[in-house]
Amino acid sequence: MTQNILILPGDGIGPEIVAEATRLLNALKDRFGLAVELEEAPIGGAGYDAAGQPLPDETLALARAADAILLGAVGGPRYDQLAWELRPERGLLAIRSELALFSNLRPAILYPQLASASALKPEIVGGLDIMILRELTGGAYFGKPRGIQTREDGVREGFNTIIYSEPEIERIVRSGFEIAMKRDRRLCSVDKANVLEVSQLWREVAERVAKDYPKVALSHMYVDNAAMQLVRAPKQFDVIVTENMFGDILSDAAAMLTGSIGMLPSASLDAQGKGMYEPIHGSAPDIAGQGVANPLATLLSVAMMLRYTLNEEAQAARVEAAVGRVLDQGLRTADIWTEGCRKVGTRE
Ligand code: ATP
Ligand code: MG
C-alpha cells in the first residue's frame, strides 16, 4: 500500500535540508522499494508569501489527508514585523493543534563519531540513546484558569493551572509504552507525585496502563531527580514519558548532552500514530541559502517517520546506518566539524 508523505519545506534553511530528505526518500523508493508518494506545500513565511496565511487552507487539507508530514523549519527576520496571527511560528502551532499532535518524541542520541563534540565525559554520554516523550497539548501551557490579577490588598499575583484528564494521561502514557516496545522496553514516567495531585493521578493511570504492557518495565521518578540523573548518568534511561512543562525542560537538557543542534530529529504524533517529523533546530536565517546547513537532523527525522508512522523499521535502520557511515568517513558540516575531519556542505 502506497503511503502519502507531505513535505513542508518552510523557510530559511528549511528548503535546503528538506531537498536532501526528498532525495533520500526518492532513493529509498527507487533502490529499496519504499512505497511512498511525495507532495509538497508551503507553510510558515512561505505560506504567507504564497497564500497570505502561515498555514494555508490547502496545506492543512493536504496535511489532513497525508499519512505523514516532513517539515523543514519556519520563520525568519523577513516576517518579524507581521501581526502574530500571520507569523510563520503561528503556522506551526496551528498545524500541531489542528492535527491534535499531542505526543512529542525527542531522541537524544550521541553518535560515537561525535563524542568529542559533547561537553560531557565519554564514559557518561558514550553510546547514549534515549527517547524523551513530552505531552504537547495539555498541562500548564493550556490549563485554565490562568492570568495575572491584583488582590484586595493591592498585591499582584500570577497563576496557572496544571490540569490533565485521565484520557489525556492515558493516551500519552500508552504512546510511551508503544515506543518502549520498539526499543529496550524500559519506560520511566517522570512526575512530581510527592507534591502535585495531578502527578498522583498521572502515576495511577500509568500503573493501570502498564497492565496492558507486561513486557515493558515501568518505573517512576520525580522530575528534580530526573534532571539530576539525566546529567549524572543519562544512559540509565531508555524511554522517558512526562507532562508538557517537565518534558520541555528535560528534552532541551537531554538534547544538549549530545552536542549539536544539527543532528537531532523529532516527531509529533496523534492518537493513531500519524505524525509530523522535523529537526529540533530552527530556520537558522544566519546560514540560510549558503548550502552549509547540516541536513542530518532532517534525514534522521525521515528515519523516525519510517519507524513510527510508516512502520518501515528496516528502511529506518538503513537511513540511520547511512548517517553513521557518512560520519565514519569523516565528513562534517561546519556545526559538527572538528580537527582532522573534512568540512562539507549540505548537498555533499
Ligand atoms: P527557532 O526560534 O526557530 O528555534 P532559533 O534562533 O532558536 O530558531 P536555530 O534557527 O535553530 O535557533 O539556530 C540556532 C543556531 O544554530 C544558529 O546559529 C544556526 O545557524 C545554528 N543551526 C541551526 N540549525 C542548524 C543546522 N541544521 N546546521 C547548522 N547549523 C544550524
Ligand atoms: Mg529556538
Image: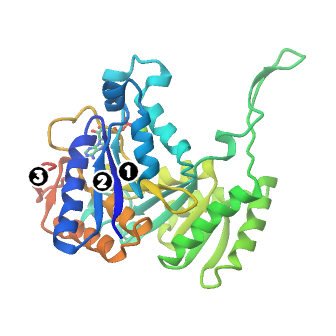
Between disc 3 and disc 1, the foreground one is 1
Q: In front here: 214 or 188?
A: 214
Q: Which mark is residue 278?
A: 1
| Amino acid at pointer 2 | Thr
Rendered view: 183 above or below 132: below
Whichever of labels 3 and 1 marks the residue nearer the N terminus, that label is 1
Q: In front here: 17 or 269?
A: 269
Whichever of labels 1 and 2 marks the residue nearer the N terminus, that label is 1
| Badge 3 vs badge 1, beta-carbon distance below 8 Å | no
Q: Which mark is residue 154?
A: none
Q: Is residue 252 left or right of residue 123?
A: right
Whichever of labels 3 and 2 marks the residue nearer the N terminus, that label is 2
Q: Is residue 322 visible?
A: yes
User: Residue 104, position in %: x, y?
Assistant: 52, 54
Give the quarter of the figure containing the C terminus: bottom left
Residue drawn at 79 percent across, 60 percent down: 201
User: Residue 327, position in %: x, y?
Assistant: 19, 65
| Badge 1 vs badge 2, beta-carbon distance below 8 Å | yes
| Amino acid at pointer 1 | Glu
Residue neighbourhood size for the residue with mark 1, other residues' Cα within 10 Å, grouped as few (<14), some (14–19), many (≥20): many
Q: How many marks?
A: 3
Residue drawn at 64 percent across, 65 percent down: 173
Residue wearing tag 2: 298
